Amino acid sequence: MTDNSNDSESQVDIKRVIEMTLDLNDTNSSYQPGDYVAVYAPNPDYQIKTLISRLQLNENKVIKIESLDSKYGKYYIYISNGNTIYNIFRDLLDITGIPSKKLLKLLAEHSSDPNEKLQLNKLSSVEGKEEYAQMINDRTTLLCLLEKYKTSSPPLAHLLDILNPLAPRDYSISSSPLSLEAGKISFVFSVLPNQSIESSLSELNINNSDNNIITKIPFQLKSSPHFHLPSEDQLSKPIIMIGPGTGVAPFIGFLQHLSKINIETKPLLTWLFFGCRSEKKDFLYKDTLHSMLQDSTLTKLTTAFSRELDINNHQDPNLEVTCGYVQEKMKNHSKELYDLIINKNAFVYICGDAKGMAVGVRNSFIDIIKQESSVDEKIAVDMFTNLIKEKRYILDVWS
């Protein structure tokens, strides 16, 4: 396990990022760079016990569930049958997610205090949309609501019906099967603001008592349907990778893989655009990327730091270090990018935020095509769309 935090005196607010290495434990599982690992993270013990206590339930009680509707299809409720209440809250229900408006109405219905009932009903209504948005921003959970609205006591049967199932968390694999010791994979994840590493690891059910001992983690390897390196017959074409923050993870796996394969048709060029807030504090895989520049696995690295730049000199001519955002930095290389994607049939990979970064990168490419081709917006969009149709513009994004 590695952590990107340091003792810098900078006041730039950043997310802490942890890299985990998992031992597949002779599962005979295989993967490619660009695939995912789905981690089945049980809910934290302290939240489960506090919630069960608040609801005045017996954690060891085994429950029996019968559906009165033969068409009722919530599978996770059926597999709750015969489980203890503790195990249901630990493994099957999402108790830490954003409460739905349906859940708010349930809490209101089972609140004995008129003021609490009024507030909860408002939260679930159109009238309370601003308060509900703030609740989402504050990452309010069911337990938070029950601690605030003390007279609400929703029945377990109703909670089983309304709470979402506990879903696995997908993480991009940041390693290549050719680079790590056989049977191991790496991935990175962010620690939420104001959350300690210990509590974050607790959410993954990891014992971090001495920073080395790790318990078993339920997981599943998931193949990406599209986000892989080009096929061998296409591998000589340039590869452009755009991955701010933890979006850089699959590209580390790409580059590790390229450094190990023994074929003559390696890419003529590999170019990574990476961005984060602070060069000093959250430049993920900084040393790895610099090493890849030195051995020419990575041809060019363009960075964009939105809040803080290290003023130390940068000697490598293939490393461009600037402030700003990746979608802005792309326009500084308009002619070169245009030549690569239009004339040299480069593959473009984008990984990261769907709403902000991915949209900005798309718009930058369209602007580049407009400028370098001297065409109008419609023709530029058509040319850009062709990249997608040719499967040379490949996304792995999340919202």
Image (cartoon, helix red, strand yellow):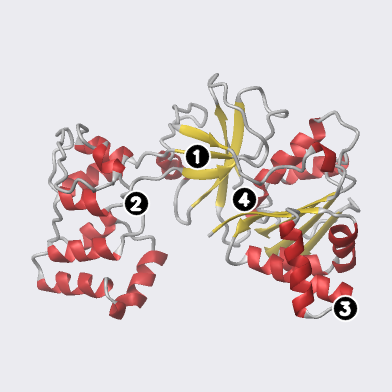
**How far apart are the alpha carbons under marks 1 and 2?**
18 Å
- Dot 2, how many residues are within 10 Å of its Cα: few (below 14), some (14-19), or many (20+)? some
Q: Which residue is mark 4?
A: 246
Q: Which residue is mark 1?
A: 38
At a point 64% along the width and 52% down the height, the residue shown is 247
Q: Is residue 17 left or right of residue 46?
A: right
Q: Is residue 312 above or below residue 48?
A: below
Q: Nearer the viewer, mark 4 or mark 3?
A: 3
- Give the SS element for disc 2: loop
- Give the SS element for disc 3: loop
- Give the SS element for disc 4: helix
Give, as a three-letter code, the residue at label 1.
Ala
Marks 4/2 in contact by CB < 8 Å: the verdict is no
Give, as a three-letter code, the residue at label 3.
Ser
Q: Which residue is mark 3?
A: 374
| Numbered label attached to residue 96 | 2
- Give the SS element for disc 1: strand
Q: Which of the 4 image quarters holds residue 381? A: bottom right
Q: Nearer the viewer, mark 3 or mark 2?
A: 3
